[in-house]
Image (tube, rainbow, N blue to C red):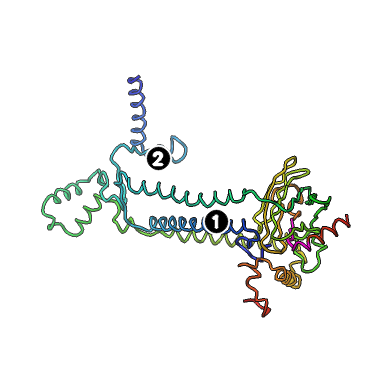
Amino acid sequence: MLRQAAGHMRGLLARRASVAVTSSAVRMASQGHEVSETVDMSRPMYYDRADVPLPDKPYKDLLTDADKSLKQKEKGPWTQLSKEEKIALYRLMFCQTYPEMKQKTSEWKTVLGGIFFFLGFTGLVVWWQRIYVYPPLPKTFEGDSQAMQLKRMLDMRVNPVQGFAAKWDYEKGQWK
Amino acid sequence: MAHPSQLGFQDAASPVMEELLHFHDHALMIVFLISTLVLYIIVAMVTTKLTNKFILDSQEIEIIWTLLPAIILILIALPSLRILYLMDEINDPHLTIKAMGHQWYWSYEYTDYEDLGFDSYMIPTQDLTPGQFRLLETDHRMVIPVESPIRVLVSAEDVLHSWAVPSLGVKMDAVPGRLNQTAFITSRPGVFYGQCSEICGANHSFMPIVVEAVPLEHFENWSFIMLQDA
């Protein structure tokens, strides 16, 4: 069983390796559509994260000759490096700087705009409904009817403790 | 009844409802405290720039947030159970009324002394006189003497209904073939409205309940008149 598992693993690794080795153009041709790269998470990865300052490996792995000579120079005193060389060394090690990582996007404008758009659309739908769908209100909603109902509620002492009639001054005949 | 744009409970018209109001205040305060705390924690978590990826265990806070909720639950449960038992106290009703739910009206039977029974239909909107309340008024009200313990036996003649009067703190399901008992005392005279509280068909929203609490004399006059009319 162990030998079976080992054989299985070798097959999987071979497939992973083939994906890593082939280019995206080749994968596109063979699969017929974009295929995302399979990343092997068990090997050291590079990532830009504000809370993890030092990733598992440097950004640039494959160094050109110029890069290699710069790295040699880095082994000496750093005061002899020019500003451009220091920046070039940084860019060898890291992809983005902290300010670049923390850059604000304009995504909030899209989100807020989408929210307002749909709120507005809902408002249009509601307005249309009020005109074309809703039946007329019952006659108890008219002003006189409401006034008479209110008077009757006060006469009946509705909610006299804290609620309704409690707020009416019966001696003066007005709201408190 | 509720006044316009009312959000909270109606004022209590019975001692049990007063207790329920106080309990609700107590429980809601606890709920507000917890919600405020959680909201504060959420805002604090979302707006901080600090990170800590190396937390392994947290014994102290785990103890706190296990014990504290248990204590809070006990603080809620004790008043709740107190009211529950309070509602089931042995009372000595002066009057027993049977409230029977039909599709779609209530009928009340006062059979302690004489044989009084009548139906209570909602007054349709087009028949309302100015000043009456839409969907709440009935042609006959359940009149009871004020400040007397009343027992109501609730049942139904066809499908499930529920007899509910919020200001008295009463709700009892009307189950066909079953007698459910509830009791209350009205602390003040007045007219108290309620609505059927169990879906029962097309006119479920149109079978209200109106309880009118009057001094004993008026109750006696009323029942005399009702008996004559029957």
User: Which residue is labeled 1 in the image?
Assistant: B23
Residue B221 placement: quadrant: bottom right
Report the span colored magenta: B209-218
User: Which residue is labeled 2 in the image?
Assistant: A25
Q: Label 1 lies in what chain?
A: B
Image location (x, y in percent) of residue B123: 80, 59
State the residue at coordinates (23%, 53%).
A90
Q: Is residue A21 magenta?
A: no
Image location (x, y in percent) of residue B148: 70, 57
Question: Mark 2, residues whose alpha carbon is within 10 Å: few (<14), some, or many (≥20)?
Answer: few
Residue A161 placement: quadrant: bottom right
Image location (x, y in percent) of residue B3: 66, 65
Question: Mark 1, residues whose alpha carbon is within 10 Å: few (<14), some, or many (≥20)?
Answer: some
The amino acid type, in three-letter code, at marker 1 is: Phe
Q: In this view, does B216 lie to the left or right of A14?
A: right
Residue in front for this viewpoint, A115 or B8: B8
Q: Disc 2 or disc 1, which is closer to the eye?
A: 1
Residue B216 placement: quadrant: bottom right
- Position of the C terminus of chain B, as image quadrant, is bottom right
Magenta residues, dominant SS class:
strand
The amino acid type, in three-letter code, at marker 2 is: Ala
User: Of the numbered discs in the image, which one, if any, rests on residue B71?
Assistant: none
Vertical side of B132 occupied by B202: above or below: above
Vertical side of B14 occupied by A43: above or below: above
Q: Label 2 lies in what chain?
A: A
For the view shown, which residue lies furthest in the bottom direction? A172
State the residue at coordinates (15%, 57%).
A81
Image location (x, y in percent) of residue A68: 18, 46
